[in-house]
Image (cartoon, rainbow, N blue to C red):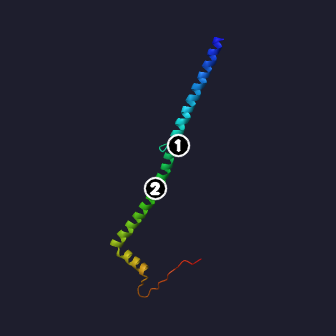
Amino acid sequence: MYGERRRLESKRERLFTTLLITAAFLVAGAILLFNRNGFMAITEMERRIETVQSVNDSLAREIDSLNNVIYLLENDSLYMEKRVREILGWGREGEFIIRFTEPEN
């Protein structure tokens, strides 16, 4: 009887230890997933970083384009003349200026 009782207590202790370890792992997993520095937060930050990098790349391309226009305006008189004529609608003698507009819907 004493051996059977001891075996039952040992079984309960092992079950309790297993449940305690499982609960500890579940709590640790939840903390790792959902705290402000957890995996979910890191994934969200990585997504935001990708978005910002995409916007940054787009702006860098726009800056390069504008720097190219600045260079042409400062160093290429034919380009500057073309741009002025487009903006102001000027033409040379004997030229016809035709403007195309988008139809209104």
Residue 17 is situated, as x and y percent measured from the top left of the image, at 57, 25
In 3D space, how far apart are the residues under numbered discs 1 and 2 (Cα atoms)? 24 Å
Q: Quadrant of the N terminus?
A: top right
Residue for badge 1: 34
Residue 72 is situated, as x and y percent measured from the top left of the image, at 36, 71
Per the image, label 2 sits on a secondary structure element best described as helix
- Vertical arrangement, residue 17 with respect to residue 92, above or below: above
Residue 12 placement: quadrant = top right
Residue for badge 2: 52
Horizontal side, residue 75 vs residue 98: left or right: left
Q: Nearer the viewer, residue 98 or 11?
A: 11
Residue that sits furthest to the left in the current view = 75
Residue 71 is situated, as x and y percent measured from the top left of the image, at 35, 69
Question: Closer to the observer: label 1 or label 2?
Answer: 1
**Residue at image point 61% right, 25% down:** 15
- Vertical arrangement, residue 12 with respect to residue 35, above or below: above
